[in-house]
Amino acid sequence: VLIKSAQELKDYHKSEEKELEQIIKGIADLGTKVIVSGSSIGEMAMHFIERYKMMAIKIPSKFELRRVCRATGAQAIPKFIVPGKEQLGMAQKLEAIEIGGSKVTVIKQDRRVGKVATIILRGATDHLMDDMERAIDDG
């Protein structure tokens, strides 16, 4: 894109803003309540996400993103576009809670949709944690 004047820059910015709003509005029109992203979410995108009363979660780990997709029945989309209804996932409940001083996001799901479970271990020493992890792996 070659911009030669300030007016062209303004017009370009407005067209980008309008396109972003159309994508987020399209996502909201599907009944989506939460957008899960594997990369950062820009300020303008967050503005429109909040305008359409949705929540955004950033999961930088590809492994964790795959787990969320498997648990919710969603399909990961590599581009920021309006997905098809069949690509959307579903969760019974999503909440942010604090466990042992760490804030975590918990996705609760019906067992029929996704069979993924997370076990949270807490212990006083690293040695105790290693023993518990080994016991779970052996089980």
Image (cartoon, rainbow, N blue to C red):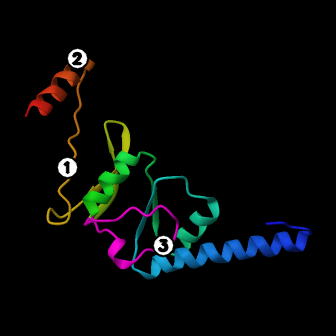
Q: Which residue is mark 2?
A: 127
Residue 109: x and y in percent read 22, 61
Residues 105 and 23: in front is 23
The answer to whether residue 7 is left or right of residue 13 is: right
Residue 17: x and y in percent read 68, 72
Pick whichever of labels 1 and 3 is earlier in the sequence. Answer: 3
Marks 2/3: CA distance?
Answer: 45 Å
- Residue 135 in the image: above or below residue 120: above
Residue drawn at (55%, 73%) of the image = 51
Residue drawn at (46%, 69%) of the image = 54
Circle on res. 117: 1
User: Viewer-nearest of labels 1 and 3?
Assistant: 1
Residue drawn at (45%, 64%) of the image = 55
Q: Is residue 104 visible?
A: no
Residues 56 and 3: in front is 3
Marks 1/3: CA distance?
Answer: 29 Å
Magenta residue span: 73-92
Per the picture, the main secondary structure of the magenta-coloured stretch is loop
